[in-house]
Image (tube, helix red, strand yellow):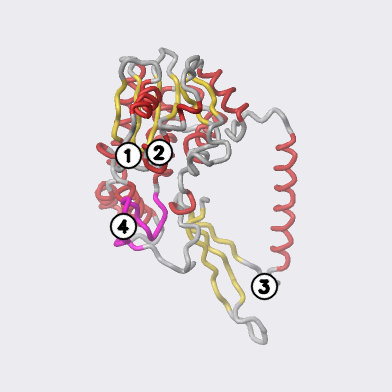
Amino acid sequence: PCIGRLVAGKGGQEGSTLKFIPEELVLYCRDFRVLRFRFHDSGLEPQASQVSICHCRRENAWLSAEESSSAPTLLFESPCDWEKELRRLGAAGWRVSPVNERFDMATSLPKYLWVPSRLLDNELKRAFGHFNARRIPRLCWHHPGGSDLLRTAGFHADSDPEKEDVRSVEALMLAGHTQCVIVETAADLPSPAEIQLSYLKLRALCLPDSSVADEKWLSALEGTHWLDHIRACVRKASEVAALLAERSRSVILQESDDRDLNCLLASLVQTLSDPHARTQAGFQSLLQKEWVVAGHPFLQRLNLLRDNDREEVSLGARVGQRGVLESDGSSIRLAHVAPRWQMSPSM
């Protein structure tokens, strides 16, 4: 959702039985736009009718688009989508596994996973319990030169693998390669809380009612550290892309819960390395694969269930156990969109 806050302006009319009649709606968008919609004196009925007509037309257009078989965007909801993308990548040593088709192995992972062809599903099941939230290593992207990009959660603290389990985990992580590079995404990247805090400062700076003088605006922008965080993310993605392309090393992105920074870094690496990811259809498929079906907690990060709609976000918000600001959603997605926009301004 692009709307951060919705405010209804109140106005009174004599003889009205309503407690208040909205005179305008103000939408504060997450991309810093402020949209105002004023209502005429004739009331809300004409505007409500126009909104209903537009909504019906949009719904019908969506239904007709669903019926078309030429939609290029892969939603990764069926094994056919996973097979099609795997063929596009040319990853011959991998297969689509339905091991999580009923979400009984891991509730936050997609129904279908890319796993090594030589690893059977019965062997694969032995590996789930040794990773946080049972989020095992799985393929994200295959480089034409033969190297692979994987992502995984951290090892479970209470894990005590048996010899057969160790073999299954090794088969997952190495996937036919003699060695791989494990990149701890939290080591060199800003935490979700730091990204969110810098975004809140940036948003306050860009709003029309900002009190910062024009001559101090650039220094105030630097003080938000937003550009520093974006630079750090792009630098790390470039290093991983170089490992895949220039050194032909397979890379495993490892994050404690594999649901925030791994989504960001895996997406940036593919955007840098794969021209298809820089097209509109490829970008949409990338978001679907690395964010939506991969289990990024949009509901919590965007705080769509905030109890008080009038709640204001403060810069001193409480930080949760995983380092995420709890009073508002994490801006990890915005940290992905910002460099993505720089790579392709026409999108």
**Distance CA(mark 2)–CA(mark 1):** 7 Å
Q: Badges 3 and 4: C-beta atoms under 8 Å apart?
A: no
Q: Residue at coordinates 52% horizontally, 51% vertically from top-left?
A: 1
Picture coordinates of residue 275, whole percent (x, y): 48, 22
Vertical order, 138 against 4 (above or below): above
SS state under label 3:
loop
> Which residue position holds label 3?
41
The disc labelled 4 sits on which kind of residue? Answer: Val
SS state under label 1:
loop
Q: Does the magenta stretch include residue 329?
A: yes
Picture coordinates of residue 338, whole percent (x, y): 40, 39
**Distance CA(mark 4)–CA(mark 2):** 28 Å
> Which residue position holds label 2?
129
Which quarter of the figure has residue 315? bottom left
**Distance CA(mark 3)–CA(mark 1):** 67 Å
> Which residue position holds label 1?
159
Please tell me how crowded label 3 is: few (under 14), some (14-19), or many (20+) other residues with Cα within 10 Å.
few
Q: What is the magenta range?
A: 314-330
The disc labelled 2 sits on which kind of residue? Answer: Gly
SS state under label 2:
helix
Q: Sequence order check: which comes first, mark 4 or mark 1? A: 1
Vertical order, 208 against 253 (above or below): below
Q: Sequence order check: which comes first, mark 3 or mark 2? A: 3
